[in-house]
Structures are given as structure tokens and as C-alpha cells.
Amino acid sequence: MNHQGLLARRTRHMGVNAIREILKVVSQPGMISLAGGIPSPESFPMPQIERLCQTVIRKYGCAAFQYDLTEGFAPLRRALAQYLQKKEVAATEAQVLVASGSQSILDALGKVLITRGDRIAVEDPTYLGALQAFTPYEPVYVCLDSDQDGLVPQSLEAALSSQPIKFIYLVPTFQNPTGRTLSLERRRQIAAIVRRHGALLVEDDPYSDLRYSGRPLPPVKSLAPDQVVYVSTLSKVFAPGLRIGFCVAPELIHRWLVVVKQGNDLHTSTFDQALAAEYLTSGELARHVPTIIALYRPRQQAMLGALERYFPKSFSWSRPEGGMFIWAKGPEGMDMEAVYWKAVAQKTAFVPGKFFFARQGAGIETLRLNFTMADESGIEAAVRTLAGVVRAAV
Amino acid sequence: MNHQGLLARRTRHMGVNAIREILKVVSQPGMISLAGGIPSPESFPMPQIERLCQTVIRKYGCAAFQYDLTEGFAPLRRALAQYLQKKEVAATEAQVLVASGSQSILDALGKVLITRGDRIAVEDPTYLGALQAFTPYEPVYVCLDSDQDGLVPQSLEAALSSQPIKFIYLVPTFQNPTGRTLSLERRRQIAAIVRRHGALLVEDDPYSDLRYSGRPLPPVKSLAPDQVVYVSTLSKVFAPGLRIGFCVAPELIHRWLVVVKQGNDLHTSTFDQALAAEYLTSGELARHVPTIIALYRPRQQAMLGALERYFPKSFSWSRPEGGMFIWAKGPEGMDMEAVYWKAVAQKTAFVPGKFFFARQGAGIETLRLNFTMADESGIEAAVRTLAGVVRAAV
């Protein structure tokens, strides 16, 4: 039987995820991958997790395995409200919404906010998962300019002045894919712009805890609380497989996110939320983050050093103070997908940067390099191999 | 700031969940609740769960806490394929899709299949969570007739003959809210009808393991494999808080469900899936289900006995061979929401049946009674109280 005719209009427009297709080869044995966007398993607090399981079972018993509130497990919401205070995000327990990874918050935001044809403003390049969450609701993307200091405020001002924009999606700190961070000055400018226009900004902040140098910057949420949905996750500082995301949204939007989440998945795993609650309240998170930083900082330094040593002078790259990625750019017109296939033949993988652009044809000479999965010597070897491939392509 | 203008068209149509509002009082201390649709915490395999945590951490280590495939954790998909064989659902590991509760499968089906205005055929009354999953995609519901033996095949035939129907949603076994089960004869008729029309049927089967008497019936999926998306969950036989749902869909639909799930939540908790995999493969599930049945069977008998003893002769009710609910019907026009508030004042809760009807104004004289949460004496007391309230209302 042919079910093609049963698909929704949105589905027929969705198309298969090209990046997923090309990354299928990455799991081949012997591959050194700078491609993934995933934390190192060495960063997981494994001995603590076994204890956390016992504590949760002893402390909450059956309640940790029962249906629970759509809004989230109360002890976790309480713990997250405290955790957010240190990030200058003011939120009560009632204002925190827990969800199944920040991905599911992006989807719920799309469902609550986007009617077909609505304009969504995004950095270009932007986080691919956000596009995957929003695209099924059939928006039109408005691409904003960004440079070394992140989103260019004038570009946002121009976009908001010329057309109705449903919301702006932004990763201001150690952005995926570029690693770039929005400067303090620009955060203030952007907060002022969204306030003036009465615009809504979705601030996605998965990486700010992974800071290897420099001083923390305030989230845009802290500068324009009424204008910003702050979205984050424990995936980078606890364990991504537990799928714990959370957000703090203006009240009306929070209320609708809860209604939509009830239809999406009723609620997020109670047990996983209870583990997260104990991880935060016991102080394990605060104790463990420095260990993760101590693991990643030398890997990032190894990558920056190897790029300096081996890459041609015609390349430039970001030097982020944290996060998981370095973004590099080759000479105009160099096709990084062609480079990808040659590098993969030499057991070295990365992600061609073009996949992160909403605009077709943009960024073909860019690449995203992850430094959390391989160790220093693996990174050194991979960058050297990659340098050989790009030198042959120059 | 007023964000009302930012809401999507679908959101402005969604409306707040009325049942959720009226059930807020149910958690008051001292309440005997026949209202919930939730398993008894006594049914959870708590001692096994503590061991399963240790086994999973030892066996899979970090992999149980890492990002994983959107399709599901391979050992769980394998275990579910085996489990489904016993239910006469033929599926390979690759054909099983794991999701964050069956709710998230219903949402994903809506996203893949429904364009605004599409017709979805549902039993009337039907499972409320399904309506909550589908409604944001703005379908039009076509209500099918059902009686003591479940969906009336002629009603389905008439609906499919007179208009395009995107899919039919059906809970054939121990339906929520009515507890009714589609007879074998009707299963065969319905399978023949959907085959003849090339229609798609979503068969939701959360309760079939909870059979207290009579013989198991084959799922409609086994009678029309190409025409049916089979959806189920471990919530009733393991622990609902772990949010493990799964489905077996025709290939094209399976493929799009995976694409959509990636945008929805990337994947379901790896740890929870690993716990479920061990629960199934170790044989714990097979050993534990009889314990759950032994817990619920006498509760159901207590409820049926009490209804017989205390309820007026003007009432009728279902006598299901399993599941979690009994469905009762009072004299034409009796307003069960009014009865609800009087019963709640006497510390006894249930759900007025009208909330389960897609048609406005239908079913005001019906009520759903859950027998899994209270014990036999609690059920006896609650039904007696309720009988007093309805006798006063007759």
C-alpha cells in the first residue's frame, strides 16, 4: 500500500536531514571524529550517578516512577530556580518549565507561536536543531548578520523595523556552530532593541557553564526579562541521555507551553528529573563542572595550537572562550563537502559548515570542528590530516 | 508586555483543558479518587528497579547516559520486537520506534499526517490524550458510533465511503474511557474495511496486558498489518514515570515519524530505555504482570459488586475483562458534572464522561470510574458515597 498521499503538507515539505545522511559514515571504526556535537562520555559523573539512583529510590520511592506534573518534578524546578539565580536569571519554581531536552522546548515554542508563513529571525549560521524544531510549523526564516562578536545589532534593528517577526532565535554564548559569543555591549543593545520593538527573543544557552577563560556574561534574559524565553539544558553538565531541558518564559507563553507539552508527551521522565534534582541539590553539579572544564580546556588548546601549526594562512577560525566548537573558514568558494569526503577517506570527520545556514548556498567554505570527543593527541592528528586535505584542495 | 498577539492560530484555538481544571481538587487530603487514569504505585516493580539500575550501569556504562539514536535504544527495540511477537504483532527490531510515552507517538502521528481541516475518525467517546495530541494540528473530527462491543463497523464503513479520512484512531481493547473491547468478529470486519478502503488505522493498545478474565484477542494490526500503526506503552506494566512508548508503523510512516521525532525531542531517555530493555530481556516483565493482575482483579470485582449493591437500577455500566476503567451511564439528561461537585464535597472523585466526547453536549449522563488506585475497601466506600449522591440527584 502507498501511504504517500496521507502525509501532511508540512511533512511533504520537510525533506530528509542531509547532515544526518552524510554523518552516517562517522561511526566507522578507526574514525577520529571532530564532527559530533556531543559531550565526551568521560565528562559524565558516573560514580555519582550510581549513588544518585540509590538516593532517589530511597528518598522518593514510587513517586519517582509515577506520572507527574506536566510542568516538571517540583524538587527539580526548585533546584533549577536556584541554579538560574547564579546565572542572573531571576525565576521562581513556578516559572521554571522542565522538558525532554531543550529540543522539546524549541518544538513546543514552534507549536505555540508559529502559524504557517510567520517570520522567524535567526543568526546565519544557526543551530540546526532549532531549524528542525521550527520548520515543521512552516515559518519563513529571516537571516540576521553576525560577525566575530555574534549577532550584529543593526541587522536585528533593520529586520524588526521592516516586517513583523514572530520571534528571534539566538545562541548568544559559545554558539553552535561558530563558538562565537555576543559581547556585553551587544547584549545591552539587543536587549534595548527587543524592548523597544516589543519583540520576543528565544535565548538558547546550553554552553555557558563550559567557560575555559574570560568572565561570564549576563544572559540577555537578565537584561530584558519580559522579552526573552530563556532555554537551557543539563545535557552538557550532567548527561545528555537523560534528556533534561528547561526554560523560563514570559507568563502567557509559559502557560501555553504547558498546555502544548501535555499534548506532546504529558511530562518528562520523573526518574530522570529526580536524578537531576539530586545532582543539583547535593552540590554534585557545582563540584563536577570544574572537572568537565579541566577535561575540555586542554582539548580546545590542542585544537587551536594544531590549527595554528598545520592550517594554511588562507584559513581563519574562531577562538572561543568556551563551549564545544571551533568554526573555520577557508578561501572563498572552497567546497568543504568535497573536503569532507576526502578527509573521511583518511578516517577524519568534521561537519561542513553549509548545513548550519538557513540560506541555500551560503557557507560552503566553512567547517565546524568539535573538540570535546577526541583527546589531545587525537585532535592533533585529526587537524594535521585535515590540513593535508585542505592544502591539496587549495 | 502583552504576548497574546504572538500566539499561533492553532494555539488561540486550543483552549484550556477543562478536565484538568476540574480535577485539580482531586489531590485534596482524604479524597478517595476513582478519577485518575493512573496505575497504582503498588504495581511498580520497585525491588527489581533498584537492581535494574545497577545492571544497566554495569552493562552499558556511559552509553546509557549518552545521546542515542532517534529510533530508540537498540537493545530495547530488539526486546520489544520479541514482546510484540507474543501479541501477534510481527515486527523486526528496525520496525519498532521507541518514543517518550505513547502520547509523543500520537503527537508525532498528528504532525506527520494532519494538515489543517483533515478529517480524523474517532470513537465517541474516545481517549482524551489522543484529542490533545491531534487537535493542535487542526483536524476536523468525524465521530464513529460504538456500543458494548466497541466500534460499530457499519459506522466506519459509512464514514470512509462518504468522505476522505486521514486516519481512524481506535483503542480496541479495554478502551479508555469505556473499558469496552472490540469483539473478534468486529476486528475482522474492521480489518477488511480498512483494507478495502486503503485507509490508515491508529490502534492504541495500552491495556491489553491487564486482562483479568477471558481470552486475549488479536490486535487489528495482526489482521491488516499494512493498514495499521500499532501504538503501545510500558506505562501500565512497568512504570509510567519512565515514559516509554513504542509503535510499529507502515514503512513510509515509520520513516517520517523518525524525522519528526528528531525535531521533537532528538530521542527518548537512553537510561530509561536501557532500564526497560533489561526489564524485558531479564524476564522480569513476564514475571511481574501476573502480580499486577492479582492486584487489580479484586479491585475491579469490588467495584462491580458495589455498583450492583448500591447504584440505582436506572444506571447501567460496562463489565470489562481487563484494563483500568468502568463506564457508567445514568438516566438521560442527568448532569454528571453537578454530581461530581457534590461527590467531591463528600471526598469522592470520578470523571464526568462528557469530557471524553469529541461532540459537544454528548454524554452528560455518563461517568468514568477508575479501579486501580484505591483498594477494595476504598472502592466500596467510594461507590457507596457516589450512589448516595446520584440517588439524591435522580
Image (cartoon, coloured by chain):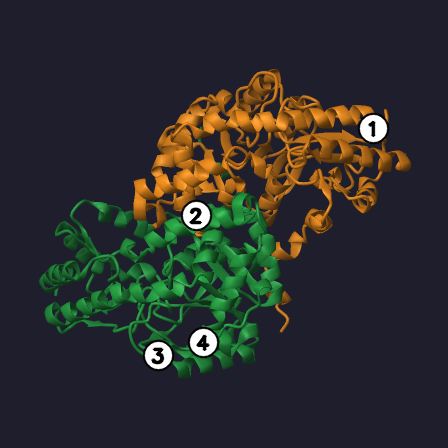
Chain colours: A green, B orange
As measured in the structure, the alpha-carbon distance from the residue carrying label 4 to the one carrying label 1 is 67 Å
As measured in the structure, the alpha-carbon distance from the residue carrying label 1 to the one carrying label 3 is 71 Å
Mark 2 and mark 3 lie on one chain; the one further toward the N terminus is: 2
Q: What label sits on residue A156 in the rendered view?
A: 4
Q: Report whether A299 appears left or right of B29.
A: left
As measured in the structure, the alpha-carbon distance from the residue carrying label 2 to the one carrying label 3 is 37 Å
Tell me the SS state at disc 4. helix
Q: Chain of mark 4?
A: A
Q: Nearer the viewer, residue A43 or B380?
A: B380
Above or below for A332 versus A239: below
Q: Which residue is mark 2?
A: A54
- Percent position (x, y) of residue B40? 60, 37
Q: Marks 4 and 3: same chain?
A: yes
Q: What label sits on residue B311 in the rendered view?
A: 1
Tell me the SS state at disc 1. loop
Amino acid type, mark 3:
Arg
Q: Chain of mark 2?
A: A
As measured in the structure, the alpha-carbon distance from the residue carrying label 2 to the one carrying label 1 is 47 Å
Tell me the SS state at disc 2. helix
Q: Marks 4 and 2: same chain?
A: yes
Amino acid type, mark 4:
Leu
